[in-house]
Amino acid sequence: MGIDKELLDILVCPKCKGDLELTKEEDGLVCKTCALKFPVKDDIPIMLIDEALPL
């Protein structure tokens, strides 16, 4: 099903409040400013800084 477009429009990076981009595989949201990838599990973005993966 994927992440809802309206949800993507309002989500921001929890660390810097910057824009997020969905990966091509739709398995994460990337903040280029912080160089972090927030995982997406079962179409739910995990927006915890401690769960983010470095790029």
Image: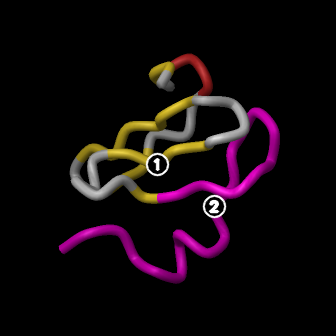
1 lies above or below 25? below
Q: Amino acid at mark 1?
A: Leu
Residue 48 among those drawn in magenta: no
- Identified at 22% across, 53% down, the residue is 25
Q: Residues within 10 Å of mark 2 (few under 14, many from 20)?
A: some
Q: Which residue is mark 2?
A: 11
Q: Which mark is residue 29?
A: 1
Q: Residue at x 66, y 70 (%)?
A: 10
Amino acid type, mark 2 = Leu
Q: Residue at x 18, y 74 (%)?
A: 1
Secondary element type, mark 1:
strand
Query: Where's residue 11, x and y in %?
Result: 63, 61
| Left or right of 21 in this view: 10 | right
Q: Are marks 1 and 2 in contact (CB under 8 Å)?
A: yes
The dominant secondary structure in magenta is loop
Indicate the position of residue 51 as horizontal and vertical percent values.
48, 22
Give the extent of the magenta segment. Answer: 1-21
